[in-house]
């Protein structure tokens, strides 16, 4: 019924011993949309009385439904001692998105050690950052953890500047197939400059030849399909 006054009765259920009750409570709070529950939702991700916390996707959905007054709670949660909470906070910042959290995201990127959270922070910076963040994203695109590197490639493509092409081009020769192919596909989305780099790779023997050829063929297939629509 979306009665905001009911929120105060539902919030305590986020600490119930039954995870089913916790999830139902979070979904109810999502429908109500009362940002006063934001801190309680964050606490439910890393509970003290249950072996399992509120699933991250439910927490993200809930926190994204609240108004702007919940932004400060989400930003603070990026420094929570539990990686699961930091991951949720970083995901919310990039999903809503929360541009005002950009300085905090940049600070956290320098100290975060959990790969999943790091990938979410990188993805968030791609959504709320800008040209000044390209050097940082370029470094993370070479991160040893593939999930982080892939998030950086997505972020570089999302920012979509000419300098993104120069950052992505070396990755087409990366030894990790998923990363090299993803970087090649990203270049196809960055205009003629990106495609020119791929054509050069495709016409020269080397580790970048196959990923570049794959991306160019994929682009050609998509173009043909759109022509049939």
Image (cartoon, rainbow, N blue to C red):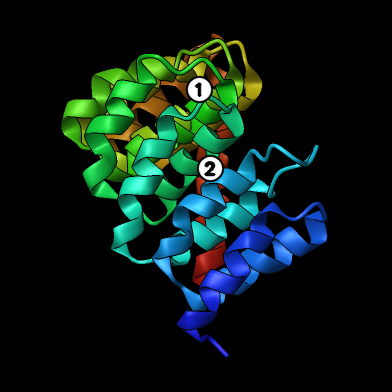
Badge 2 element: helix
Question: Quick check: 186 above or below 165?
Answer: below
Q: With 72 as the anchor, is 40 left or right in this view? A: right
- At x 33%, y 52%, the residue is 71
- At x 38%, y 24%, the residue is 168
**Location of residue 42 in the rendering, given as x and y in whole percent from the top left corner:** 53, 47
Return the disc, 1 or 2, that comes first in the chain's sequence: 2
Residue 99 vs residue 175, the one in the foreground: 99
Q: Residues within 10 Å of mark 1 (few under 14, many from 20)?
A: many
**Name of the residue lying farthest toward the left:** 132
Question: Quick check: 133 above or below 54?
Answer: above
**Location of residue 128 in the rendering, given as x and y in whole percent from the top left corner:** 28, 44
- At x 50%, y 22%, the residue is 149
Residue 8 vs residue 134, the one in the foreground: 8
**Location of residue 56 in the rendering, given as x and y in whole percent from the top left corner:** 63, 47
Rendered image: mark on residue 88: 2
Quadrant of the image containing the C terminus? bottom right
Q: How far apart are marks 1 and 2 (CA)?
A: 19 Å
Q: Name the residue under label 1.
A: 149
**Location of residue 227 in the rendering, given as x and y in whole percent from the top left corner:** 50, 69
Q: Residues within 10 Å of mark 2 (few under 14, many from 20)?
A: many
Q: With 11 as the anchor, is 128 left or right in this view? A: left
Residue 153 vs residue 209, the one in the foreground: 153
Q: State the image quarter where residue 196 is shown.
A: top left
| Number of marks in picture | 2
Badge 1 element: helix
Rendered image: mark on residue 140: none
- At x 41%, y 63%, the residue is 36
Q: With 34 as the anchor, is 163 left or right in this view? A: left
| Whether residue 83 can be seen here | yes
């Amino acid at each position: 019924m979306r009665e905001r006054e009911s929120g105060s009765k539902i919030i305590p259920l986020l600490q119930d011993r039954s995870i089913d009750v916790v999830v139902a409570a979070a979904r109810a709070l999502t429908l109500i949309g009362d940002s006063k529950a934001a801190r309680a939702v964050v606490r439910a991700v890393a509970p003290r009385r249950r072996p399992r916390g509120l699933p991250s996707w439910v927490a993200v959905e809930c926190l994204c439904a609240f108004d702007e007054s919940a932004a400060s709670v989400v930003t603070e949660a990026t420094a929570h001692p539990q990686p699961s909470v930091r991951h949720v906070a970083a995901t919310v910042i990039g999903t809503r998105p929360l541009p005002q959290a950009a300085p905090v995201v940049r600070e956290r990127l320098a100290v975060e050690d959990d790969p999943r959270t790091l990938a979410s922070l990188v993805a968030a910076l791609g959504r709320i950052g800008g040209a000044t963040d390209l050097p940082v994203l370029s470094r993370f695109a070479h991160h040893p953890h593939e999930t982080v590197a892939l998030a950086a490639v997505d972020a570089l493509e999302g920012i979509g500047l000419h300098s993104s092409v120069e950052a992505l081009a070396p990755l087409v020769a990366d030894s990790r197939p998923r990363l090299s192919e993803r970087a090649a596909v990203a270049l196809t989305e960055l205009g003629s400059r990106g495609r020119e780099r791929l054509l050069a790779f495709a016409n020269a023997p080397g580790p970048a030849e196959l990923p570049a050829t794959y991306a160019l063929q994929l682009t050609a297939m998509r173009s043909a399909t759109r022509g049939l629509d």
